[in-house]
């Protein structure tokens, strides 16, 4: 894990805050911010795991940090018998974190205990510590500093094992070879040391500015046939302050030239570098470089010898805010660090501000050359202590969510007419017929209204209004008409409605029924009237099922309780009212308007054809419709039940349904007649 | 590569933490809790497990700090032993073998070298409190058979025993009476609640007891929620008690603060109540702790409390009643309806968590990540309330969609059902409710599955229900002039002869949907929703259904309740094979053709791993668990393993986890037990060397001067005292674990000898000191020379002074001689 240097006013200090992912599974992300706080975040749930403030955090700010390699085994292994099921140990658990400070001390912080473990001072550095590296297995720690020295620490005893001068200027970066026997150090030039003897093994030219990061990129030589001494043939990478080029070097025999083998070019100074080690020759090295401008550049390259041209990145990742509204432009969100997950196919990105970063796992898609992720981090600015302790996340439930209740279209599968071919024909015909007839009817409508207005001003203009409202979909008109509570008025209006407006009316009623229950109470009256009065017309319609499917489902769902009883009740009401109505209206002449609608002779012929063709299905429609009517009626009943006081009536209704209905109709119908007359 | 051993079943996922009261260390840095056969040591600051103390062979039933050494911990177990631990390093120091089952442990500072345990002797439900004398012996395993009887006929739970007022008496409660035993008088007084004879008030039996640390006051908790404070109980007649009543339900536990000024109580209300000065008026509350408080404990330092909850968590609470940390295992309070799932995004295990929540549990770090609040309603903790249960959940489309089903059924006809579809919003990195469906079905939803085919354009979800229908829901465009939106709508409703739909499952490519209707399996085309064919074996209701994967995608597997496992070939529409296997859990591996089935027999559960193409199983493991296995899941590995032997190949790409009825999460491991068993000390074995504080500098300067004065007068014997670390015998004695040391009698003479001053050692000591100084000088010199390196001698590593002399090279000796000539008088001037 590379750790960037600390931010300070020194122009040659590396940019970015020191931060690092914990080794192995990257469960934690440690970040030492410029205010002197060390914060450790859990990468999996983006939770602040702990915060630590060193006592000297203002004078000696943290300049670099490094996680200790995970300990797999303790020294004493207690003997025990094998058990059927034992606990899975938390292997790979990481604990110690080494922090280098600006005053030259090194702190070892235990993340398990949440306290300072030890402090390495005596015989160490007397100036800013630039880089810390843990040895993989020997329990040693290497640090380098502005005081030009490299120190080897024995962590077990917290004492200096060895201290030597590493460079003529400050030593800014360190890296231990994969076999653990060599050490790379860099100020401006890069040196490879033999750890046992502390002698320089190779020199490399290095960079013009202080090297901020060093990393071995391969663990095996490219040429497998030659005997491998652990170091020859390995590649390593270096990045420097103010340098937009990352150089790759190869450790070769002594006489060869000391310049870089190849280089990668990025857009700004590298702040954080992570890579996946390639284990065999074919597997490319994957490299993620976080730049000071907040972008991540991804490289994928098989290292094999020279390459003159600097390589550009395969993929660039940027993060930006969504930019609310039209005015505000999306702003970039800086990426602080990026680390490859253990599957090498996804990347952990740390972005946002350093005091409240967001950590996200992003799957890599190598095909895209540029990835711009839009992230809204405005709501995670304030750290929430509550959620940090209870670990409860509340998903957003806003009003924009779609709500489906029984009866609303979408809750149940839409009813489609059974034979698809005939349906097509029908719709063609229908649509054709409609298009022509709408104009005609509109024309006729105008005449109608005029005529009516002239004929009798005292009769209610509700049918006219309603027709107009339905044609124009004018909410005001419709509300005015449909919100009436007068049952007689409703009945009369429905009786006088032209037949072609029945279906639109039903659809409008269905829409309103789905809405607020209060309006549904009113609509039920309308629906009841429409269905009783125009049942015969509706039963002649060939495409009734698809047209009134939603209404049917709605009613079906609303009469779930006492379903069978309400079916029966509805059927009886329908039959009886129709019988009585037909008896009463025998004498009465049908309204004049009816004749006006009969003039569509051609279409009626067609319809009759259809009727012949689909006789069987027609029966079904009848059934459906009757059911729906009956249910609707029951619905009324339910509403009534809700409104207290009418319970008794309903009870009677059920007992002596026929009688009651007869009486009811006899009450209503004379009125109708009288008014019609 | 991992060494291939036998595949073993290992436990994971935070075992039970709330079995007994947790115990704080003396400095409140650590908290100990029993967890199955282990004792776990957690840090109170970071919530991390520092050590797992293993050694007991049965359930650990009690832990207490050693009152004589606060760095040691006693634990007792049903295996009949008391063990003494060094919890800082996680080392077992001593084992005392008592012999009978121990149910609880108490220690008392006044009772030196004896502890109190609860045992049951003759009858199964009669428990006794006895004191066990722990013999002093150097050997690691000691028999402790000296039991002395204290109290008889007591309650098994340690909550019903309390030692009071510096060990003057012990109070025990059971049913309707409180018994107090006075150690000095050796008498027992018994107080019976007056109302116990009266059946009307039968609910006031005792549940727990606590004793005031300094005064003669006993607090007892009762079934009806009252707390009684007993005073003046030395007299059988004149005793008094006062009542504190806030809890409306049983008082689960009581604890006095260290000073005794306040009393803490908790119960099912999940509210921690602090009674100040033992009066009813001064109450403080810490509400909404999430689940029933089972235990309360107080740190000896007095700065922290902790509450153990029924949902397997420990909350650490500051003195000012602010929760500071939560140690949370896998939430275990309630039954698991959702089964085990893997969140494709976080790779976390997802299952029912807190009431109304889904818990996300990271298997890699063995930690709970978070709880996702699905129901979003205040949970009322009360007995007998019918709550909304989260019954089903499923992830779809690579974690972009989450479907949850919640249900509440008060009576048979009054079912409330709601399905929610959540969309993962990448911008805000969280789930947002997209569609809420009330009563998606008329009856309970039995199965829920997404079509997870890679190339499916339209997310598809299928729900199967007991009402005889299955519904297909698809995501459609809901945009209108105001907003762009997507929403779910029902696309198709299918049924088969009014049979209850019991299972549903999509084939790997999403082209076929299999729905089982009781005994019949129906196959539907997922494009036209036409019924393609049916399979019926008349072998009982289908319990599990799954398609084969990859090369075995032409097979469909069904397990029935009558214990038959059937495999149908979808190309020939015929039964390929069947086997008699009472399958409880059947899970396909998403990364291979393998299918794991766990069968249930009277003896235990067995695991079978097989490929649908061949009825011969790849791997069989008998007896994976004694109890019923309820759920299982394959978890894809991040980095594939490479087992070569045939028996382990099925573990190469995925790991199999399963959950038993008692909600322990188990998995299979191939690693050797040693490797798994020794992760206890997680720290590098680095010595703690903390630097001096400024305060030390003030004091230290003074000290140093003293030291130097003493250095001048080396003849004085006292001088040696600060240097004792350098005497090998002493350092050996101090640094070797106690259990490997030889007997004290043997060591004694050596130890005393080493403390005596002898001419030789003194001179030897002088020399290494000189070496140090000289070499430091040298290293300073070397700074000027470029690339000159020099090792600093590590003095602490050297065992004996003589060794150092031998290590010195000739040149160094020469220089030493030079140094001898140098005048050291300047030291005195310092």
Image: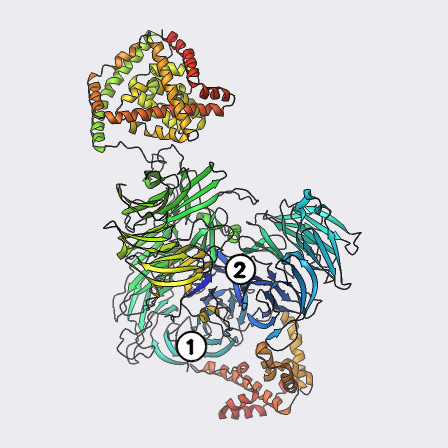
| In the image: residue B39, left or right of residue A496 | right
| In the image: residue B536, left or right of residue A348 | left
Q: Is residue B755 above or below residue A610?
A: below
Q: Quadrant of the C terminus of chain A?
A: top left
x and y percentages locating residue B237 in the rendered image:
80, 52
| In the image: residue A415, left or right of residue B128 | left
Residue at mark 2 shares a chain with residue at mark 1? no
x and y percentages locating residue A591 in the rendered image:
31, 10
Label 2 element class: loop
Chain ID at mark 2: B
For label 2, count other residues whose C-alpha is less than 10 Å away and answer few (under 14), some (14-19) or many (20+): many
Pointers 2 and 1 in contact (CB under 8 A)? no
Alpha carbon of mark 2 to alpha carbon of mark 1: how far?
A: 41 Å
Q: Toward the viewer: A223 or B437?
A: B437
Label 1 element class: loop
Picture quadrant where residue B440 is located: top left
Q: Toward the viewer: B315 or B253?
A: B253
Residue A641, numbered circle = none
Q: Quadrant of the N terminus of chain A?
A: bottom left
- Whether residue A357 appears in this view of the structure is no
Q: Toward the viewer: A498 or A363?
A: A498
Q: Which residue is mark 1?
A: A166
Q: Which residue is mark 2?
A: B47
For label 1, count other residues whose C-alpha is less than 10 Å away and answer few (under 14), some (14-19) or many (20+): many
x and y percentages locating residue B685 in the rendered image:
51, 73
Count of picture labels = 2
């Amino acid at each position: 894990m590379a750790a960037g240097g600390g931010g300070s006013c020194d122009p040659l200090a590396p940019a970015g805050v020191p931060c690092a992912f914990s080794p192995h599974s990257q469960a934690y992300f440690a970040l030492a911010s410029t205010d002197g706080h060390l914060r450790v975040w859990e990468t999996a749930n983006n939770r602040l795991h702990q915060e630590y403030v060193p006592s000297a955090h203002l004078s000696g700010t943290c300049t670099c940090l490094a996680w200790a390699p995970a300990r797999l085994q303790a020294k004493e292994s207690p003997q025990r018998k094998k058990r059927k099921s034992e606990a899975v140990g938390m292997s790979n658990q990481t604990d110690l974190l080494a922090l280098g400070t600006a005053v030259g001390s090194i702190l070892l912080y235990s993340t398990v205990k949440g306290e300072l473990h030890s402090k390495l001072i005596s015989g160490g550095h007397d100036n800013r510590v630039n880089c810390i590296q843990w040895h993989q297995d020997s329990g040693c720690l290497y640090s380098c500093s502005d005081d030009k020295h490299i120190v080897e620490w024995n962590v077990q005893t917290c004492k200096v094992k060895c201290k030597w001068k590493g460079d003529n200027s400050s030593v800014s970066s360190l890296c231990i070879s994969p076999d653990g026997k060599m050490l790379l150090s860099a100020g401006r030039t890069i040196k490879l040391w033999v750890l046992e003897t502390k002698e320089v093994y190779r020199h490399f030219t290095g960079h013009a500015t202080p090297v901020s990061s060093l990393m071995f990129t391969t663990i095996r030589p490219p040429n497998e046939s030659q005997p491998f001494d652990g170091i020859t043939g390995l590649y390593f990478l270096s990045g420097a302050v103010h340098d937009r080029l990352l150089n790759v070097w190869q450790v070769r025999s002594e006489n060869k030239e000391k310049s870089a083998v190849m280089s990668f070019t990025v857009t700004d100074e590298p702040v954080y570098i992570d890579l996946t080690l390639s284990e065999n020759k074919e597997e490319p090295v994957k490299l993620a470089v976080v730049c000071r401008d907040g972008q991540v550049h991804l490289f994928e390259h098989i290292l094999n010898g020279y390459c003159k041209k600097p390589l550009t990145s395969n993929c660039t990742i940027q993060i930006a805010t969504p930019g609310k509204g039209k005015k505000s432009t999306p702003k970039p969100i800086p990426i602080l660090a990026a680390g490859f997950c253990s599957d090498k196919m996804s990347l952990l990105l740390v972005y946002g501000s350093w005091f409240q970063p967001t950590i996200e796992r992003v799957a890599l898609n190598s095909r895209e050359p540029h990835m711009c992720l839009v992230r809204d981090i405005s709501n995670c600015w304030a750290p929430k202590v509550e959620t940090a302790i209870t670990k409860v996340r509340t998903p957003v439930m806003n009003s924009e969510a779609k709500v489906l209740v029984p009866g609303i279209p979408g809750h149940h599968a839409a009813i489609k007419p059974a034979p698809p071919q005939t349906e097509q024909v029908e719709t063609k015909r229908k649509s054709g017929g409609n298009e022509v007839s709408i104009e005609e009817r509109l024309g006729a409508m105008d005449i109608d209204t005029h005529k009516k207005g002239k004929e009798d001003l005292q009769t209610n203009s509700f049918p006219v209004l309603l027709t107009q409202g339905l044609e124009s979909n004018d909410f005001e008109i419709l509300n005015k008409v449909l919100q009436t509570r007068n049952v007689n008025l409703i009945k009369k209006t429905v009786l006088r409605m032209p037949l072609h407006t029945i279906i639109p009316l039903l659809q409008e009623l269905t829409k309103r029924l789905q809405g607020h229950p209060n309006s549904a109470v009113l609509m039920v009256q309308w629906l009841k009237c429409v269905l009783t009065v125009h049942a015969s017309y509706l039963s002649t319609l060939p495409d009734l099922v698809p047209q009134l499917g939603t209404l049917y489902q709605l009613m079906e769902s609303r009469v779930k309780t006492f379903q069978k009883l309400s079916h029966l009740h509805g059927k009886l009401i329908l039959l009886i009212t129709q019988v009585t109505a037909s008896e009463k209206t025998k004498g009465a002449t049908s309204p004049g308007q009816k004749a006006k609608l009969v003039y569509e002779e051609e279409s009626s012929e067609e319809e009759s054809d259809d009727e012949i063709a689909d006789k069987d299905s027609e029966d079904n429609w009848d059934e459906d419709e009757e059911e729906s009517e009956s249910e609707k009626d029951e619905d009324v009943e339910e509403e009534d039940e809700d409104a207290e006081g009418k319970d008794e009536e309903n009870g009677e209704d059920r007992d002596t349904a026929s009688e009651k209905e007869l009486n009811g109709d006899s009450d209503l119908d004379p009125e109708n007649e009288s008014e019609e007359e | 590569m991992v060494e291939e051993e036998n595949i073993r079943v290992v436990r994971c996922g935070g075992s039970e933490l709330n079995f007994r009261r947790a115990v704080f260390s003396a400095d409140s840095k650590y908290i100990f809790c029993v967890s199955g056969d282990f004792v776990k040591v957690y840090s109170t600051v970071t919530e991390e497990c520092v050590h797992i103390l293993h050694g007991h062979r049965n359930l650990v039933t009690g832990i207490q700090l050693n009152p004589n050494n606060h760095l040691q911990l006693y634990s007792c177990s049903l295996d009949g032993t008391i063990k003494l631990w060094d919890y800082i390093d996680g080392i077992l120091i001593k084992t005392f073998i008592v012999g009978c089952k121990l149910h609880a442990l108490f220690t008392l500072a006044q009772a030196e070298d004896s502890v109190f345990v609860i045992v049951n002797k003759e009858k199964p439900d009669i428990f006794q409190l006895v004191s066990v004398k722990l013999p002093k012996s150097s050997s690691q395993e000691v028999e402790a058979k000296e039991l002395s009887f204290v109290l008889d006929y007591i309650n098994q739970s340690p909550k019903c025993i309390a030692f009071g007022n510096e060990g003057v008496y012990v109070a025990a409660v059971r049913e309707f009476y409180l018994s107090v035993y006075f150690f000095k008088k050796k008498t027992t007084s018994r107080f019976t609640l007056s109302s116990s004879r009266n059946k009307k008030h039968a609910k006031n039996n005792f549940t727990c007891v606590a004793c005031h640390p300094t005064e003669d006051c006993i607090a007892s908790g009762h079934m009806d929620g009252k707390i009684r404070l007993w005073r003046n109980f030395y007299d059988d007649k004149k005793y008094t008690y006062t009542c504190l009543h806030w809890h409306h339900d049983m008082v689960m536990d009581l604890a006095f603060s260290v000073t005794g000024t306040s009393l803490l109580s908790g119960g099912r209300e999940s509210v921690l109540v602090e009674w100040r000065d033992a009066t009813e008026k001064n109450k403080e509350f810490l509400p909404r702790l999430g689940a029933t408080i089972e235990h309360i404990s107080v740190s000896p330092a007095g700065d922290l409390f902790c509450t153990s909850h029924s949902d397997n968590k420990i909350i650490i609470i500051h003195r000012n009643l602010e929760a500071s940390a939560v140690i949370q295992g896998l939430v275990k309070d309630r039954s698991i309806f959702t089964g085990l799932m893997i969140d494709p995004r976080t790779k976390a295990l997802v299952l029912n968590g807190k009431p109304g929540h889904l818990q996300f549990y990271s298997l890699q770090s063995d930690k709970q990540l978070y709880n996702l609040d699905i129901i979003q309603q205040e949970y009322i903790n009360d007995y007998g309330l019918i709550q909304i249960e989260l019954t089903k959940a499923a992830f779809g489309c690579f974690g972009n969609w989450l479907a949850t089903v919640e249900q509440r059924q008060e009576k048979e006809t009054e079912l409330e059902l709601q399905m929610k579809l959540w969309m993962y919003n990448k911008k805000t990195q969280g789930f947002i409710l997209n569609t809420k469906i009330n009563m998606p079905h008329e009856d309970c939803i039995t199965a829920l599955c997404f079509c997870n085919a890679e190339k499916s354009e339209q997310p598809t979800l299928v729900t199967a229900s007991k009402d005889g229908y299955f519904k297909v829901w698809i995501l459609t465009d809901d945009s209108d002039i105001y907003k762009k939106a997507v929403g779910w709508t029902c696309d198709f409703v299918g049924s088969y002869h009014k049979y209850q739909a019991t299972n549903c499952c999509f084939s790997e490519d999403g082209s076929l949907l299999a729905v089982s209707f009781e005994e019949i399996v129906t196959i539907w085309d997922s494009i036209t929703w036409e019924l393609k064919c049916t399979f019926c074996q008349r072998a009982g209701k289908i319990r599990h259904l799954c398609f084969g994967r990859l090369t075995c995608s032409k097979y469909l597997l069904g397990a029935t309740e009558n214990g038959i496992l059937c495999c149908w070939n979808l190309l020939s529409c015929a039964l390929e094979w069947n086997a008699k296997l009472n399958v409880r859990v059947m899970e396909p591996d998403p990364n291979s053709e393998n299918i794991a089935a766990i069968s249930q027999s009277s003896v235990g559960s067995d695991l079978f791993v097989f490929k649908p193409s061949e009825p011969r199983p790849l791997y069989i493991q008998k007896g994976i668990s004694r109890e019923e296995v309820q759920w299982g899941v394959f978890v894809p590995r991040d980095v594939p393993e490479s087992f070569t032997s045939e028996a382990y190949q099925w573990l190469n790409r995925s790991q199999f986890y399963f959950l038993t009825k008692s909600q322990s999460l188990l998995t299979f491991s191939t690693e050797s037990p040693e490797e798994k068993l020794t992760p206890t000390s997680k720290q590098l074995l680095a010595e703690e060397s903390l630097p001096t504080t400024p305060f030390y500098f003030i004091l230290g300067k003074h000290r140093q001067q003293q030291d130097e004065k003493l250095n001048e007068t080396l003849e004085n014997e006292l001088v040696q005292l600060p240097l004792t670390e350098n005497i090998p015998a002493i350092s050996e004695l101090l640094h070797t674990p106690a259990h490997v040391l030889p007997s004290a009698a043997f060591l004694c003479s050596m130890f005393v000898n080493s403390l005596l001053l002898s001419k030789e050692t003194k001179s030897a000591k002088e020399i290494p000191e000189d070496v140090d100084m000289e070499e430091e000088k040298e290293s300073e010199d070397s700074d000027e020379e470029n690339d000159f390196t020099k090792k600093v001698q590590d003095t602490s590593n050297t065992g004996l002074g003589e060794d150092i002399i031998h290590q010195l090279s000739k040149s160094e000796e020469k220089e030493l001689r030079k140094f001898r000539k140098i005048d050291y008088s300047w030291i005195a001037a310092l």
